[in-house]
Amino acid sequence: MEKCRLLLTPLRIGGLFLANRMVMPPMVTYLAEDDGLVTPAHVKHYTRSSGPGLVIVEGTAVSPEGRFSTRQLGIYDDRHIEGLSRLAQMIHKNGAVAGIQIHHAGALAFQEKWKPEPLRRFIKYWLLAKQQLMISRLRHIQNAFESAAVRAVIAGFDIIELHAAHGYLFSQFLSRSKNWRMDRYGRRVEDRRRFLLEVYQGVHSSVGEKALVICRLGVADRCSRSLALSDGIATASELEKIGAQLLDISSGGGVPKGIRTEGSPFSGMLHLAKAVKSAVSIPVIGGGGIHDPNLAEKALQDDFVDLVAIGRSMLADPSWAQKIIAGRPESIVVCRECRVCYHHTASSRCPARKKQFGSCKSLAPP
C-alpha cells in the first residue's frame, strides 16, 4: 500500500525484527481477577489486536502493594508466569514482537478506592509524604522490578518496558512538585532521576542479554515547575547512555502549553516525542490522537517518530493494523473520541466496538 509505505516498513532494533512501524501501546483493560492472573478475556483481547509489529502488554504490577487497581495484571508471583506466557505466545503467533510494561503506582496505589474527593486528596498527599521516607524500601522496589523482569523473560517476552510516565512512581520521583526528598534522590534533576536510572540498570543487568529493556518516559508535566521538558529530555539522554535502545515517549502529568505548534495536525504528545527524537540517536515511539493511517504515515515522513503508537484507535477497532496491511484502510471503524473514553468505565458502551462486536462483553471487567 503506497500511501502507508513507511508505516509498513520493517525495523530492526538490536536482535529484534519488527515487521512494521505500528505499535499497540500498553493500555490497561481491567480484566484481571483480584490475584492479578490472566483471564480468558485477556487472551481474546490480545488475539483480536493483531497486525502491529510490536504489541506491548498493559501495565503489569511488580508488587501487590504497587497496584493502582485490584483488576490490574500482576507479575509479582511465579503463579503469573503461565498466563502471561499465553499472551506472549499469542502475540508471537500473530507475527509481532511481544513486549510487556512493568509498573508500580507509587503514591497512586489503589486510587480507585479513594472516595470521596476530599479523602482522595488527603490520602494522595499522605502517601506522597510517606514515600519520601521510604529510603529502605527503594531497594525492595528495585528488587521487585528485577524479579518481575526475570518472570517476563521466562514467560517469553522480547521487550520489557519500565513505566516512567503518567504520574506513577518514577514520574513522582522526576516531578519537583511531588518529590520532596532532600537526599540523593531529590532536589536537582540529576538526583530526581537517579532511582529510575538505578532500576533500569538493575533490570538491564538481570535480563539485558535475553530481552530488550526500554522505558516509557513521561518527559514533561503540564506545569513546567513539576517537570520541565528540558529535564525530561536530559533523562532520555541518560537512559540512552546506560544502554536503552528504544524509548516510548509520553507525558508525566499532561502536556505543557505551547509544545504543540499552531496548525499542527499532531497531538502535543507527538510533539513531545519529536523533541526527544531530536536529542537522541535511538528509535522513538510516539503517539496520541492517531486515528487516520495517513496521519500515522505523516508522523513518520516528518520525522516525529520512528514507530507510531496506535492506542484508542485499536481499542475502537482491534483490526486497525490488519486493515492497513491488507490495503483496506477505508474499512477501519474509527474511534469517535468520546469525551469520556468508555474503555476504562464501561467498554461495552464503546460505539465503535459495539458496531463490530455487539455488546462487546469481552472487554467488560469480570
Image: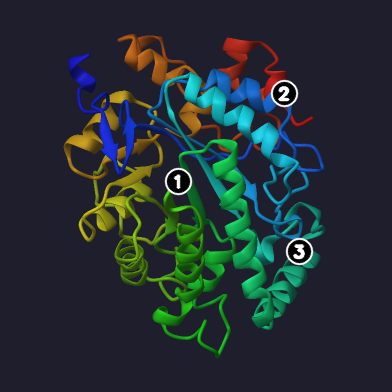
Residue drawn at x 36%, y 63% is 239
Tag 3 and tag 2, C-beta contact below 8 Å: no
Depth check, front residue: 212 or 347:
212
- Residue tagged by mark 1? 210
Amino acid type, residue under disc 2 in the picture: Pro
Depth check, front residue: 123 or 264:
123
Q: CA distance from mark 1 to mark 3?
A: 41 Å
Q: Is 179 placed above or below 245 here?
A: below
Residue 1 percent across, percent down from the top left: 22, 13
Residue drawn at x 30%, y 10% is 327
Residue 120 tag number: 3
Disc on the earlier residue, 1 or 3: 3
Which element type, helix, strand or loop, lies under badge 1?
Answer: loop
Which residue occupies the extreme bottom position in the image?
A: 182
Residue 23 percent across, percent down from the top left: 40, 34
Image quadrant in which you'd find residue 108: bottom right
- Residue tagged by mark 2? 40
Amino acid type, residue under disc 1 in the picture: Lys
Disc on the earlier residue, 1 or 2: 2
Residue drawn at x 27%, y 36% is 12
Please rate how many residues cluster around mark 3, counting C-alpha atoms within 10 Å: few if below 14, some from 14 to 19, many from 20.
some
Amino acid type, residue under disc 3 in the picture: Arg
Tag 1 and tag 2, C-beta contact below 8 Å: no
Which element type, helix, strand or loop, lies under badge 2?
Answer: helix
Please rate how many residues cluster around mark 2, counting C-alpha atoms within 10 Å: few if below 14, some from 14 to 19, many from 20.
few
Q: Is 349 placed above or below 332 here?
A: below
Depth check, front residue: 221 or 117:
221
